């Protein structure tokens, strides 16, 4: 606030000065020009009203009281009908109560005694335009603040979006298997729980398919762990190519995978299992002259009255898968 007040200057402010006495008028004009004010002059109340109407953006009205044709207070009364907030200073030799009371009623901001003292005049003018200027300055500051706030708001929105993007990426990273780029164990089990509850509510088919690579240890032992990794990626792509949009393949262990089959019946499950088994069996891994035949053992389970949670379906499929291993591998059990 203090800095704003310090900024208030009379320089370039437009003053309408009304005075009938030639000597007083001429000397006061010199003073007002000394303040570097823009001075509009009138010699009586009527001329003052005319000058007010002719000129725009008058900052302050400075007027004598006793004048021919129309006195200062009547002139103020008239002008205030157009602009009630116009800062007004009266110059007066009278200090009678009646004048003062009327002046206050008219909303006169300040007064100056005759003979005019330059400092008193300056103070009176500043005091009268101060609230008015402060108001416009505050409005300006408010506008600037509003703009700043909007800019800040936009930045916050951008940041929030960026954070949202980062969170999404983190979620994706946290739910993805780093080797094969498919859903990991945590994600596939969470998704499975959700899909099962929806399937139960909507009375829709739901099945799971669990598979484990046969004799995978031998692949590692023969060709090395790195080739083993490549085989895992290859099997992932082979199996993915047999699936539909609504199926989700996840890696739940070293060489163990789980597929969630949303909307797939027991019949559909049997057909798909055979398709996957054959796809893997008939497409050996090939790389730089080496050819590695791979097979998988599959265990399957479908949602029904007894097997009604993902955990139960998983246990059922896991037992079936071990049965497939026992029965010689490269086969499907349920
Ligand atoms: P089975 O037919 O009974 O499943 O025999 P298996 O050799 O596949 O089974 P086992 O559980 O004895 O061995 C699995 C092997 O898978 C052991 C481990 O070295 C390998 N393995 C697990 N995770 C990875 C991996 O991320 N990369 C590679 N290269 N090998 C892995
Ligand atoms: Mg007079
Ligand atoms: Mg295994
Ligand atoms: Mg295995």
Image: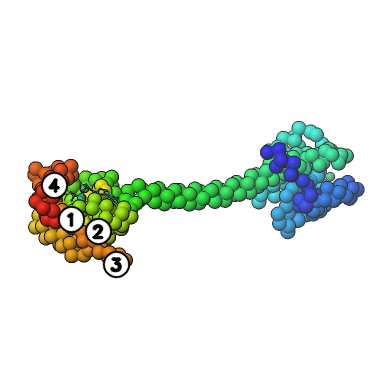
Above or below — where is 165 with respect to 66?
below
Q: Which residue is mark 4?
A: 322
SS at mark 2 in the image: helix
Q: Does the Cβ of the disc 1 residue fall within 8 Å of ligand 4?
A: no
Distance, label 2 to label 3, CA atoms, is: 18 Å
- Separation (CA) of disc 4 from disc 2: 20 Å
Vertical order, 163 against 233 (above or below): above
- Percent across and percent down for residue 185 are 27, 46
Please report the residue visible at 63 percent of the width from the left and 49 percent of the height from the top. Answer: 140
What crowding class fits label 2: few (fewer than 14 Cα within 10 Å), some (14-19), or many (20 or more)? many
Q: Residue furthest top?
A: 97
Residue 235, label in figure: 2
Q: Are marks 2 and 1 in contact (CB under 8 Å)?
A: yes
Farthest residue to the bottom: give it. Answer: 289
Precedes in sequence: disc 4 or disc 1: 1
Residue at 78% x, 40% y is 124
Nearer-the-camera pick, 75 or 124: 124
- Earlier sequence position, callout 2 versus callout 1: 2
Mark 1 lies on residue? 296
Residue designated by label 3:
289
**Given this view, does label 3 or label 4 mark the residue nearer the observer?**
3
Residue projecting furthest to the front: 222
């Amino acid at each position: 606030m203090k800095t704003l007040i310090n900024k208030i200057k009379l320089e370039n402010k437009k003053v309408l000065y009304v005075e009938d006495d030639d000597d007083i008028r001429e000397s006061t004009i010199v003073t007002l020009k000394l303040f570097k004010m823009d001075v509009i002059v009138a010699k009586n109340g009527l001329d003052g009203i005319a000058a007010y109407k002719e000129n725009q953006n008058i900052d302050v009205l400075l007027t004598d009281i006793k004048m021919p044709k129309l006195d200062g207070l009547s002139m103020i009364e008239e002008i205030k009908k157009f602009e009630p907030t116009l800062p007004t200073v009266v110059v007066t030799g009278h200090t009678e109560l009646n004048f003062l009371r009327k002046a206050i009623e008219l909303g006169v901001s300040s007064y100056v005694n005759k003979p005019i003292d330059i400092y008193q005049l300056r103070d009176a003018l500043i005091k009268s335009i101060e609230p008015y200027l402060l108001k416009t300055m505050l409005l300006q500051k408010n506008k600037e603040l509003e703009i700043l706030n909007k800019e800040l708001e936009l930045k916050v929105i951008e940041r929030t979006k960026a954070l949202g993007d980062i969170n999404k990426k983190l979620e994706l990273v946290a739910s993805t298997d780093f080797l094969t780029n498919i859903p990991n164990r945590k994600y596939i089990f969470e998704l499975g729980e959700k899909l099962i509850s929806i399937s139960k509510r909507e009375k829709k088919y739901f099945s799971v398919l669990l598979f484990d690579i046969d004799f995978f240890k031998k692949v590692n032992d023969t060709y090395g762990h790195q080739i083993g990794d490549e085989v895992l990626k290859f099997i992932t792509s082979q199996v993915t190519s047999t699936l539909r949009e609504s199926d989700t393949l996840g890696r739940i262990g070293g060489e163990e995978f789980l597929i969630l089959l949303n909307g797939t019946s027991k019949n559909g499950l049997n057909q798909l299992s055979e398709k996957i088994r054959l796809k893997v069996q008939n497409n050996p891994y090939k790389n730089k002259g080496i050819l590695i035949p791979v097979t998988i053992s599959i265990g399957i389970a479908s949602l029904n009255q007894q097997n009604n949670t993902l955990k139960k379906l998983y246990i059922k499929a896991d037992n079936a898968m071990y049965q497939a291993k026992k029965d010689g591998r490269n086969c499907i059990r349920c």
